[in-house]
């Protein structure tokens, strides 16, 4: 019993001693461990005070006790925990076993001190060698750069490099990159009057560490699939039944099997991707691979773009010619909000406006507006507007208005309007309008209108084509207006002198009418609408002058059954004698009637017509030929130009 009392007494004395020792340690230096997530600040402060055996004192307006915070600390001082909790915004003062929280007073700097701090610069020269970590050989074409200032250089022969930079802080970070090697980041400090030496060995990327699949739609992103190394430890070398294996051996078999399956899946994916690329006629083209891009970028920029997989952003940039500009030789990696290129500019991307005296050249996306004296080139997607004196050339998807003095070219799909003095070319689909002085070409599906001075070409169009000469499309749902219209199929109107519609109307017509004219006509068009080229003559022909006519018309055909069709057409013919005339003599007809198709390629037709004829009374043949030509006149008018209206008929044969 006495022994137990002795043990209890010793314990009480030890505990009291620990309490006294704890109280003698300054509050801010007492160490605690705390893990709290998403609790009120007041709760966290109470927990800290309980663990460190002291009490807080603070102004309620200074400490927002209802604020939700999280804190994790292991064996850290109270000061470290409070600094993290209040982000170094408070000061602490101990009174006995109380800790008072106070607002930190920051002394106001004088204007001269503030300006000195803002203009503080550290000019640094870093030089040294890059080597292969495995072979020890020097590495050329290694990029080293300082991201804040865009200062950069590339190592030369034997791996030697020399980088000049200006840092706003005495400590700065440099990044080292080379294609096929692991990226390296180093932090250096200003010393030795800014002249520093640094030698670095780069480790090659192991092929089994990463499989990279480049996307055909977005060249700025990569899909990386990591394959873990094969686990061979404790894997049975001989054939052993699964039941006889240890648990460690079974786990190794399962892991090895999964790795083999993963490798096989990746092999299948790569094979499928290769097949798709073979079938893809619109592969992604990098702007660096174009002829103008190769001339523009050069080998130096090509190495930089291959090495550095980083992005930079700037509010503005000014370039005379690359690389003479505010972004230097890294300009092809920088996204700018405002860009001004005195002659030629080469930049990474745009999110704003860009002006160029000769050429604006972007590697990636353009969001905003571009204005150029000669041309705009965009390697990524375009959204906004482009204006150029000569051309706009885009290698990604486009959602914009494009205006160019000569041509607009889009490599993928487009939405908006293209207007060019000579030609618009769209290799993908188009949702919008194309207008060009000479030609419009769409390699994919089009929804909208093409208007050209000479030719329109589209694979499939929902909308219309209007050309000064010829329209070409595989499938048309809408209209074609031109001298010649060509399509495989057309569900709409084909209005032209000649229409070649594969599944449409192609008929050769022989006819006669109430004027004893014998006519020959070619009817061509879609299944319902068609154009008519016609000519007629009277029989027998006279040496002194035979009445001959030629003209054009349009018509509509409605299918009543497999055999019967109802046709209506309107047209006008110029009346001449032996195709010579110096006066206006015009015969217009509105015909309607029935077509009976006995079998494919052969039909007869007949119907009635309303006719209008206008004749020049000064024509020497008016009194002898034209004045009495119209039969069954229902209305007439005579002045300088005499007019007659009458009813008539027509009958004939249609082939094909």
Image: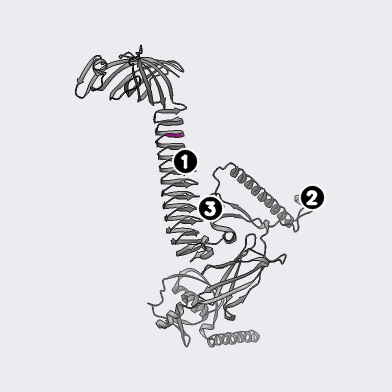
Q: Which residue is mark 1?
A: 442
- Residue 67: x, y in percent? 42, 71
If you read the primary sequence from the N terminus, does the residue marked by circle 3 or circle 1 appear first? 3
Left or right, 498 with respect to 272, comes to left
Mark 3 or 2, nearer chain start: 2
Q: How many residues crowd mark 2 within 10 Å: few (<14), some (14–19), many (20+)?
A: few
Relative to 24, say whether 346 is above or below: above
The answer to if 155 sits in the magenta stretch is: no
Q: CA distance from mark 3 to mark 1?
A: 23 Å
Q: Earlier in the sequence, mark 2 or mark 1?
A: 2
Q: Which residues are magenta?
A: 466-472
Colouring style: one colour
Q: Quadrant of the C terminus?
A: top left
Which of the two marks, 2 or 1, is nearer to us in this view?
A: 1
Disc 2, SS: loop
User: Which residue is the site of mark 2?
Assistant: 239
Q: In this rendering, does residue 226 appear at all?
A: yes
The residue nearer to you, when weighing 31 against 333, is 333
Classed neighbour count for the residue bearing mark 3: other residues with Cα under 10 Å, few (<14), some (14–19), many (≥20): few
Write the residue at 60% across / 73% down: 126
Look at discs 3 and 1 and give the one toward the viewer. 3
Q: CA distance from mark 3 to mark 2?
A: 62 Å
Tell which of 594 and 581 is nearer to you.
Answer: 581
Q: Which residue is mark 3?
A: 292
Q: For the residues labelled 2 and 1, say whether their Cβ atoms are less than 8 Å apart.
A: no
Image coords of residue 450 (percent x, y):
41, 39
Position of 340 relative to 101 (above/below): above
Q: Quadrant of the N terminus?
A: bottom right
Q: In this rendering, is residue 403 above or below 113?
A: above
Q: Residues within 10 Å of mark 1 (few under 14, many from 20)?
A: many
User: What is the CA distance from the residue labelled 2 to the residue labelled 1?
Assistant: 63 Å
* SS at mark 3 in the image: helix
């Amino acid at each position: 019993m006495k022994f137990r009392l002795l043990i209890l007494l010793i314990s009480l004395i030890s505990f009291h001693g620990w309490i006294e020792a704890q109280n003698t340690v300054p509050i801010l230096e007492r160490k605690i461990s705390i893990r709290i997530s998403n609790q009120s600040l007041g709760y966290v402060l109470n927990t800290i005070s309980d663990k460190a055996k002291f009490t807080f004192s603070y102004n309620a307006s200074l400490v927002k006790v209802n604020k939700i915070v999280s804190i994790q600390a292991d064996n850290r001082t109270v000061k470290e925990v409070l600094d993290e909790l209040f982000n170094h915004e408070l000061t602490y003062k101990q009174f006995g076993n109380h800790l008072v929280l106070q607002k930190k007073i920051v002394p106001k700097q004088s204007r001269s001190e503030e300006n000195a701090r803002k203009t503080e610069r550290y000019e640094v020269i870093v030089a040294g060698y890059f080597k292969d970590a495995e072979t020890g050989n020097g590495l050329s074409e290694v990029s080293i750069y300082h991201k804040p200032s865009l200062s950069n250089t590339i190592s030369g022969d034997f791996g030697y490099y020399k980088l000049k930079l200006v840092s706003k802080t005495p400590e700065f970070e440099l990044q080292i990159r080379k294609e096929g090697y692991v990226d390296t980041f180093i932090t250096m400090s200003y010393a030795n009057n800014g002249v520093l030496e640094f030698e670095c060995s780069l480790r090659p990327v192991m092929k089994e560490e990463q499989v990279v699949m480049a996307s055909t739609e977005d060249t700025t992103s990569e899909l990386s699939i990591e394959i873990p190394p094969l686990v061979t430890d404790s894997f049975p070398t001989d054939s052993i039944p699964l039941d006889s294996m240890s648990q460690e051996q079974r786990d190794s078999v399962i892991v090895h099997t999964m790795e083999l399956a993963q490798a096989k899946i990746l092999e299948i994916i790569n094979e499928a991707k290769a097949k798709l690329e073979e079938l893809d006629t619109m592969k992604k083209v990098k702007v660096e691979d174009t002829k103008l891009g190769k001339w523009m970028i050069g080998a130096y920029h090509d190495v930089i773009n291959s090495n550095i997989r980083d992005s930079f952003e700037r509010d503005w940039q000014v370039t005379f010619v690359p690389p003479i500009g505010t972004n230097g030789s890294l300009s092809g990696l920088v996204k700018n909000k405002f860009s001004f290129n005195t002659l030629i500019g080469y930049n990474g991307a745009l999110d704003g406006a860009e002006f160029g005296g000769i050429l604006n050249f972007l590697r990636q996306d353009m969001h905003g507006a571009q204005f150029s004296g000669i041309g705009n080139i965009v390697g990524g997607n375009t959204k906004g507007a482009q204006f150029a004196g000569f051309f706009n050339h885009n290698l990604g998807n486009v959602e914009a208005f494009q205006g160019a003095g000569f041509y607009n070219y889009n490599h993928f799909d487009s939405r908006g309007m293209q207007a060019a003095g000579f030609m618009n070319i769209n290799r993908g689909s188009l949702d919008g309008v194309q207008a060009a002085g000479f030609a419009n070409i769409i390699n994919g599906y089009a929804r909208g209108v093409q208007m050209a001075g000479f030719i329109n070409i589209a694979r499939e169009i929902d909308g219309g084509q209007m050309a000064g000469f010829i329209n070409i499309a595989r499938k048309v749902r809408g209209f074609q207006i031109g001298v010649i219209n060509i399509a495989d199929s057309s569900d709409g109107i084909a209005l032209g002198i000649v229409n070649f519609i594969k599944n449409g109307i192609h008929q050769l017509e022989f006819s006669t009418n109430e004027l004893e004219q014998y006519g020959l006509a070619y009817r061509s068009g879609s299944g319902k609408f068609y154009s008519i080229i016609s000519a007629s003559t009277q029989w027998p022909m006279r040496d002194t002058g035979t009445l001959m006519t030629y003209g054009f018309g349009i018509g509509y055909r409605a299918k009543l059954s497999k055999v019967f069709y109802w046709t209506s057409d309107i047209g006008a013919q110029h009346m001449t004698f032996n195709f010579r005339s110096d006066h206006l003599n015009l015969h217009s007809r509105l015909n309607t009637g029935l077509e009976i198709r006995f079998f494919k390629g052969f039909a007869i037709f007949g119907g009635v017509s309303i006719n209008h004829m206008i004749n020049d009374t000064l024509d020497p043949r008016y009194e002898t030929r034209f004045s009495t030509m119209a039969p069954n006149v229902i209305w007439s008018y005579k002045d300088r130009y005499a007019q007659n209206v009458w009813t008539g008929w027509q009958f004939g044969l249609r082939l094909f």
